[in-house]
């Protein structure tokens, strides 16, 4: 017995699927929207970079009045301003003073603010809520009001024209804000981590140092960056408490180019460009944790 198979012809039109216009999924931008958003971002970047580029351009002008006629700089660009600043001024003394003050403020300020924020976040002692508000109140006093009592205190402690005195003054400014910042970040870290540390036999400080701090790196980076910038750019306290020109910070050293009857703006521009290098380097080292600390929580799974 033989069997025959009958093949049924397939209609080609049935196998062809007609594809309509592509639909834009939710969360997916159209080409026009993407172009507009990229154009806005490019314009914003150019606006942000223009002051920096303009400063670099003015620093290449050899005359102090070139900023009045910037078009004339193109034909006489020179690096003499940078050579003069590096060889004829106390730039490296200012650099040393600035690094001592800023790094000292950053290290001491972050240590104090981290321990304070952790204590308020984890421990319940009498007045722990009011304590944080007291720190916040200290930020409400203007610099002019604090200048005289701080000068008297530092004078009695013989810390006038002393790096330690200026570091302590800056810490009194940065610690309240950073303590609030770190307290909020520690609140996002689960309490179970502290309990696991105690079960393993760690002391409260051991739990803080070995378990909590590694998880709080983004928050520490934000606190360090804030402390660094505050100490780096402050003028009023530095110009009042530091009397020796060799102990000036960069912010105060810039003022030496401006006198009662003259202003060497070309040298100021060159110095400002050189000053930006340490800040850029510090930002480069902390940028990864800095972005995470500003945009994400501290809970780790």
Image (cartoon, rainbow, N blue to C red):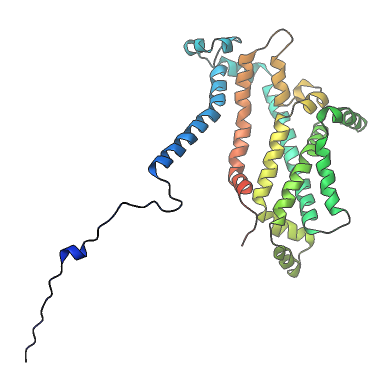
Q: How many marks?
A: 0
Reply above or below: 289 against 148. Answer: below
Q: Residue at x 76, y 25 (%)?
A: 247
Residue 8 horizontal/vertical position (percent) = 13, 75
Q: Residue at x 38, y 42 (%)?
A: 31
Reply above or below: 226 against 246. Answer: below
Reply above or below: 24 against 32. Answer: below
Q: Quadrant of residue 9?
A: bottom left
- Residue extending furthest left? 1
Q: Residue at x 45, y 34 (%)?
A: 39
Q: Nearer the viewer, residue 17 or 214?
A: 17
- Residue extending furthest top? 261
Q: Residue at x 8, y 87 (%)?
A: 3
Q: Quadrant of residue 56?
A: top right
Q: Is residue 157 toward the left or the right of residue 99 in the image?
A: right
Q: Nearer the viewer, residue 231 or 188?
A: 188
Q: Quick one: quadrant of the N terminus?
A: bottom left
- Residue extending furthest right? 156
Q: Quick one: quadrant of the C terminus?
A: bottom right
- Residue extending furthest bottom? 1
Residue 295 horizontal/vertical position (percent) = 61, 48
Q: Nearer the viewer, residue 69 or 17?
A: 17
Residue 108 horizontal/vertical position (percent) = 77, 42
Is residue 207 in view from this perspective?
yes
Residue 4 horizontal/vertical position (percent) = 8, 84
Q: Quadrant of residue 268?
A: top right
Is residue 160 in view from this perspective?
no
């Amino acid at each position: 017995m033989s069997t025959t198979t009958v093949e049924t012809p397939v209609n080609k039109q049935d196998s062809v699927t007609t594809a309509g216009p592509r639909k834009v999924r939710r969360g997916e931008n159209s080409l026009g929207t993407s172009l507009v958003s990229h154009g806005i971002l490019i314009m914003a970047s150019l606006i942000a970079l223009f002051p920096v580029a303009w400063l670099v351009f003015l620093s290449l002008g050899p005359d102090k009045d070139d900023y009045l006629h910037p078009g004339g700089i193109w034909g006489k660009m020179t690096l003499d301003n940078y050579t003069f600043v590096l060889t004829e001024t106390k730039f490296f003394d200012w650099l040393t003073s600035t690094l001592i003050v800023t790094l000292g403020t950053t290290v001491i300020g972050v240590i104090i603010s981290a321990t304070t924020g952790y204590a308020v976040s984890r421990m319940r002692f009498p007045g722990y809520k009011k304590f944080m508000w007291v720190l916040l109140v200290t930020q409400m006093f203007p610099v002019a009001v604090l200048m005289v009592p701080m000068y008297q205190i530092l004078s009695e402690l013989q810390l006038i024209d002393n790096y330690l005195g200026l570091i302590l003054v800056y810490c009194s400014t940065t610690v309240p804000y950073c303590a609030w910042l770190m307290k909020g970040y520690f609140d996002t870290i689960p309490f179970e981590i502290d309990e696991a540390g105690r079960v393993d036999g760690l002391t409260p400080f051991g739990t803080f140092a070995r378990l909590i701090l590694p998880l709080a790196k983004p928050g520490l980076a934000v606190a360090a960056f804030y402390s660094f910038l505050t100490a780096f750019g402050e003028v009023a306290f530095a110009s009042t408490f530091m009397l020796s020109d060799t102990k000036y910070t960069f912010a105060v050293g810039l003022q030496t180019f401006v006198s009662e009857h003259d202003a060497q703006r070309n040298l100021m521009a060159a110095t400002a460009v050189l000053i930006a290098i340490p800040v850029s380097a510090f930002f480069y080292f902390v940028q990864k944790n800095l972005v995470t600390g500003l945009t994400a929580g501290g809970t780790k799974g």
